[in-house]
Image (cartoon, rainbow, N blue to C red):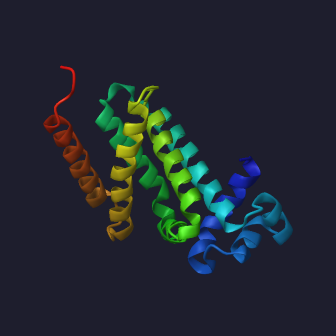
Amino acid sequence: MTDRHDAIIDRLLPLIPHLGWTSRALAEAAGDAALAESAFPRGVRDAIAAWSALADRRMAEAAAAEGLEGLKVPARIRRVIAIRLEQAQPHKAALRDALALLALPWHAPISARLAGATVSAMWYAAGDKSADFSWYTRRATLAAIYGATLAFWLRDPSPDLAMTLEFLDRRLADHARLHRIIPRRGG
């Protein structure tokens, strides 16, 4: 995506609570319907995908700026998820509506692709360099944890992330407990 796409997305997000994810909102954010169509040929679907990619980049940049290397992996993952939710907080309604659109059956392929890209971006931001089978298992596990946390956050009426982060902490603790219970093979 280009800076032009990012700028349109930044102008679009405040419009979503009033106009929804519509071609009208896209045209207004782009300043012109033809420009919106050239930037996002598949309309709202492309705009949501562009927003997801922009959010992934901004999350990774913020994590890099914080220098998470000194933290253990679970703490890094927790912080990366917190960054993602902190950045999304002003656009909670837009995210809720985007997720509702992506939940439609015909959007399953793009929904899965965006979820996969986000959890990969989270792992890379947390410093993951795996290239074996664990690459897949780490992403599948994080997708479940992040998905549950995101669902909780969407219903969390508090103005801060305290309750959501407590929920996330419980999910991470559950995962750690499960990891300790399941014996490792070959050893």
The quadrant holding residue 19 is bottom right
In the image, taking residue 47 as reference, residue 84 lies left or right, namely: left
Between 128 and 80, the residue placed more toward the observer is 128
**With respect to residue 76, does 21 lie above or below?**
below
The furthest residue to the right: 34
Please state the horizontal and vertical placement of residue 89, each as a whole percent of the image: 45, 61
Residue at the image position 72 percent from the left and 69 percent from the top: 26
Task: Tell me the quarter of the image containing the C terminus.
Answer: top left
**With respect to residue 110, does 82 lie above or below?**
above
**With respect to residue 93, does 4 lie above or below?**
above
Please state the horizontal and vertical placement of residue 22, each as a whole percent of the image: 67, 75
The quadrant holding residue 70 is top left
The furthest residue to the left: 181
Between 144 and 29, the residue placed more toward the observer is 144
Please state the horizontal and vertical placement of residue 123, each as a whole percent of the image: 44, 37
The furthest residue to the top: 187
Residue at the image position 32 percent from the left and 67 percent from the top: 158
The furthest residue to the bottom: 18
Residue at the image position 21 percent from the left and 37 percent from the top: 179
In the image, taking residue 86 as reference, residue 20 lies left or right, namely: right
Please state the horizontal and vertical placement of residue 74, each as a whole percent of the image: 29, 37
Mark count: 0
Between 84 and 138, the residue placed more toward the observer is 138
The quadrant holding residue 40 is bottom right
